[in-house]
Image (cartoon, rainbow, N blue to C red):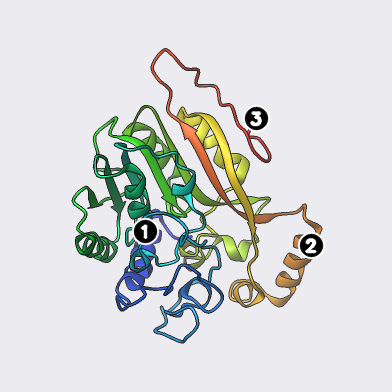
Amino acid sequence: METAEQIKEVVRQKYGAIAELPDANGCCGSAQPGPTSCCGSAQAGPSSPGPEIEGNVPIMMAQDYQELNGYVADADLGLGCGLPTQFARIRPGDVVVDLGSGAGNDCFVARAETGETGRVIGLDMTPPMIDRARKNAKALGFTNVEFVYGDIEDMPFPENLADVVVSNCVMNLVPDKHKAFTETFRILKPGGHFSISDIVLKGELPEGLQKDAEMYVGCVSGAIRKDAYLQLIQDTGFFNIQVQKEREITLPDEVLQNYLSADEVADFRQQDKGGSAWGIYSVTVFAQKPMPDTETKTAVCCGPDCCN
């Protein structure tokens, strides 16, 4: 089993390679990633072959950002699994922090909501992603959007900085999720909140998917059970926990065959059809940091399969 630092290094290498693809259309080429994009087969464009990222895990999890205000095609690498900024309740003047900001996609959407009076900060541990995001911000002429190098488990930010935290398919890449949510709690202002899209599980992953570091980069083997994920958020001190959106992720056979035997794939499909053994889901979760002495820390969880 890879150590936490080994996993982080794999993540840096894979996402760094994606960040260094040609600027034209980025990795996935458009906001409509599909089975021929890097989200699906490691190709650069949505419909034409392009440079492959060696060992990149095909994932078809990203959603279409094109209808959101502030969307910037050059910043959309199709690496997310939801639309957290759509649900983040960002207000004009807010300070927003995006964890795992990549090329800046969610930051620019957040900037459209917070306006010129607000501030948006992207945090990423992959230097080529930081470079690409800064180039995008400079090209757009934004002076209130910045990108900072750092680790989500040890954020280089002061306490009580952010009104809102967003993140898109990143927490499952973090080896120490408890520490990541603790840091998220620390940098939020009292009364602040987060909206995070992530991959969670129902049931247990097959062993072949659990142990592979490249599948970890594909946002699958790093995922934990949904009930444990929501409980972790509650244990960190957040309240008013809500599942804002949930959708099932289906892995194609050509992906599964990289990690499972033919018999294991068949067993996987049989369990999948049963609908009760296990599954992979994209969820967008909202939670608040309490105000001192004025709000209960008891979680009030809404949405499918409540955490309580």
Distance in Å between CA atoms under marks 1 and 3:
33 Å
In the image, what residue occupies the spot 51% across and 58% down?
A: 81
Q: Amino acid at mark 3?
A: Asn
**Disc nearer the start of the sequence (2/1):** 1
Circle 2 — which element?
Answer: helix
Query: 97 left or right of 265?
Result: left
Residue shown at 40%/60% (left/top)? 7
Looking at the picture, does residue 74 appear above or below residue 298? Answer: below
Crowd tier of the residue under label 3, counting other residues whose Cα lies within 10 Å: few below 14, some 14–19, many 20 or above = few
In the image, which disc is placed on residue 273? 2
**Number of numbered discs visible in the structure rendering:** 3
The earlier-in-sequence mark between 1 and 3 is 1
Asked whether residue 100 appears in the rendered view, the answer is no
* In-image side of 290 versus 156 (left or right): right
Q: CA distance from mark 3 to mark 2?
A: 27 Å
User: Which mark is nearer the camera, 2 or 1?
Assistant: 1
Which residue is label 1 attached to? Answer: 105
Q: Which residue is mark 3?
A: 308
Location of residue 87 in the rendering, given as x and y in whole percent from the top left corner: 49, 44
